[in-house]
Amino acid sequence: MKGEVVHEWETKIGETILVEKRKKKVKVPYVESELAVQEAVDRVCDEDRYSKYNVTAVQGVPRYNLTSSVIDNKDHRKYLSSTCQALIADHEHEIVHFFYSKKGTSEMQAAERAICTDIGKMCNIQDTDRLQKTYLPAEEAPAAA
């Protein structure tokens, strides 16, 4: 999710939008608006993003694992996309606020942890640490402590 938000900021540098402030329309940089974050968050759950995930069961609990090749299992894609959409729907305001308020801070590095553990309450710190070490590309994984 962090990658999508950062990509939105990077590709829209220099663009402006009109926003209402104190009953006046004011032109502001797009990347400084909550709209930039909102649009990026809206794209995060696209089904196509999950074509490289495979499912395995560990003690009867399904585990979705990112692979290097396209698996393209439609059922897996739909399940992961709907889970993502549920998280976004339940916590959209908090997620948008997190990215908007943390832009340019070191807290952005822990975005996945903050969203999954603190905002969504869907996983614990050990889960997010394990996922970041295993599945995130090197440029998105947080630096080792």
Image (cartoon, rainbow, N blue to C red):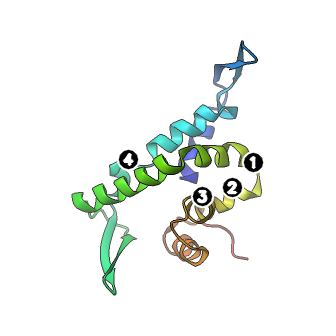
Q: Which residue is mark 4?
A: 46
Single out the mark in the foreground, 3 or 1.
Answer: 3
Determine crowd level at label 2: few under 14, some 14-19, many 20+ residues with C-alpha closer than 10 A: some
Q: Position of residue 69 (x, y in %)?
A: 32, 66
On screen, 114 above or below 9? below
Identify the amino acid type marked 3.
Ile
Badge 3 marks a residue whose secondary structure is: helix
Badge 2 marks a residue whose secondary structure is: helix
Q: CA distance from mark 4 to mark 1?
A: 26 Å
Quick check: 59 left or right of 3? left
Q: Are marks 4 and 1 in contact (CB under 8 Å)?
A: no
Residue 117 position by quadrant: bottom right
Q: Position of residue 17 (x, y in %)?
A: 63, 21
Residue 55 position by quadrant: bottom left
For marks 3 and 4, the one nearer the N-term is: 4
Badge 4 marks a residue whose secondary structure is: loop
Badge 1 marks a residue whose secondary structure is: loop
